[in-house]
């Protein structure tokens, strides 16, 4: 099974990867990484119909469940396998919107590909004609380290290691930990057993610990799990300080312009009413 998994992954094109620390999540549908199979299918083929049917089924399921996998028997072609998973703290409505965005983006990114995978901030979607459901996969698919601390690296490393240790020791497929100003998050894909999830997270934790050193943030995505930490603030905060200030300034400007427009319209209305009264 492991050899088959490695073979399957080798068929994927290099992954695209653009992500920021999870403490500055702009929205659940922000792109993190994606990759596509090199094997292609022709437009209008039965396989394309199967892909569309599978993704439609997964999207429908996401309106009431945070995870689901599906095997589409295929019509005049090989079977098709797929799954989606939403982040453990995402609401049902946001899960549906995230999966919808993921399917829309993977449709563009992997157009004509027999397999594809995409990770957004709030959800993960994957499909392929080679079975992968239930198979452990600890292959590194994406990683990123933030800037190195300019202050006390010893304090950061101590808090970060405590967070990572808690993430590794807790149960469940979705885990969150905060120690002081350092927060962490980890998640396994729902088709893994508890033991497989623990093994996957253990490797991801070691990779982020060894690879990111005294960085203020670190993300490691393996095939079936990920671990992330950040020292930039409280988990779930939307945007860093400069982005927040810019966003607030823009919102104020837009609000002022809208207010001015309403005042102009109101004054124009009053003028017309006054002129109509004079004319009467």
Image (cartoon, rainbow, N blue to C red):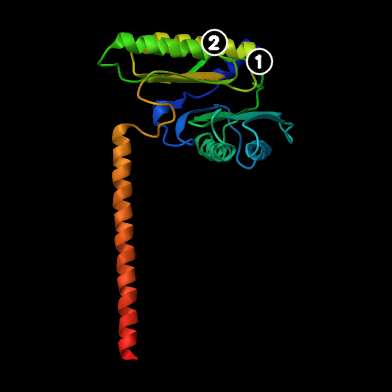
Neighbourhood count class around disc 1 (C-alpha, 10 Å): few under 14, some 14–19, many 20 upward = some
Q: Nearer the viewer, residue 139 or 254?
A: 254
The quadrant in which residue 23 appears is top left
User: At 25% across and 15% down in the image, what residue appears?
Assistant: 151
Neighbourhood count class around disc 2 (C-alpha, 10 Å): few under 14, some 14–19, many 20 upward = few
Q: Are marks 1 and 2 in contact (CB under 8 Å)?
A: no
Q: Is residue 271 left or right of residue 187?
A: left
The quadrant in which residue 207 appears is top left
Mark 2: secondary structure: helix
Q: Nearer the viewer, residue 82 or 63?
A: 63
Q: The N terminus lies in which quarter of the figure?
A: top right
Q: Is residue 117 visible?
A: yes
Q: Nearer the viewer, residue 55 or 241?
A: 241
Mark 1: secondary structure: loop
Q: The C terminus lies in which quarter of the figure?
A: bottom left
The Cα–Cα distance between marks 1 and 2, rounded to whole angstroms, is: 15 Å
Residue 100, horizontal then vertical, whole percent: 56, 40
Q: Nearer the viewer, residue 70 or 130?
A: 70
Please tell me which of labels 1 and 2 falls first in the chain.
2
User: At 33% across and 11% down in the image, what residue appears?
Assistant: 155
Q: Nearer the viewer, mark 1 or mark 2?
A: 2
Q: Is residue 61 left or right of residue 240?
A: right
User: At 74% across and 36% down in the image, what residue appears?
Assistant: 75
Q: Is residue 209 left or right of residue 124?
A: left
Is 217 located above or below residue 93 in the figure? above
Q: Is residue 19 visible?
A: no
Residue 178, horizontal then vertical, whole percent: 44, 19
The circle on residue 179 is none
Q: Which residue is mark 1?
A: 193
Residue 77, horizontal then vertical, whole percent: 71, 32
Q: Which residue is mark 2?
A: 169
């Amino acid at each position: 099974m492991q050899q088959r998994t490695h073979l399957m992954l080798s068929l994927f094109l290099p992954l695209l990867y653009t992500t920021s620390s999870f403490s500055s999540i702009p929205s659940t549908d922000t792109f993190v990484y994606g990759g596509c199979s090199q094997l292609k299918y022709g437009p209008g083929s039965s396989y394309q119909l199967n892909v569309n049917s599978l993704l439609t089924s997964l999207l429908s399921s996401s309106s009431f469940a945070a995870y689901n996998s599906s095997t589409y028997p295929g019509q005049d072609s090989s079977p098709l396998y797929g799954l989606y998973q939403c982040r453990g703290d995402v609401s049902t409505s946001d899960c549906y919107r995230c999966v919808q965005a993921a399917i829309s983006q993977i449709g563009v990114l992997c157009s004509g590909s027999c397999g594809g995978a995409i990770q957004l901030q709030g959800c993960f979607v994957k499909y392929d004609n080679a079975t992968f459901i239930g198979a452990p996969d600890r292959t590194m698919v994406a990683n990123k380290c933030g800037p190195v601390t300019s202050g006390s690296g010893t304090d950061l490393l101590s808090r970060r290691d405590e967070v990572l240790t808690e993430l590794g020791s807790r149960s469940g497929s979705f885990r969150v930990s905060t120690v002081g100003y350092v927060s962490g998050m980890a998640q396994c894909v729902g088709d893994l057993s508890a033991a497989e999830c623990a093994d996957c997270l253990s490797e991801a934790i070691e990779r982020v610990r060894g690879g990111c050193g005294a960085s203020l943030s670190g993300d490691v995505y393996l095939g079936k799990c990920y671990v992330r930490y950040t020292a930039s603030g409280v988990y779930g905060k939307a945007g860093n300080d400069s982005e927040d200030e810019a966003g607030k300034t823009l919102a104020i400007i837009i609000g002022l312009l809208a207010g001015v427009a309403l005042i102009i319209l109101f004054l124009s209305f009053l003028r017309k009413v006054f002129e109509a009264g004079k004319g009467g």
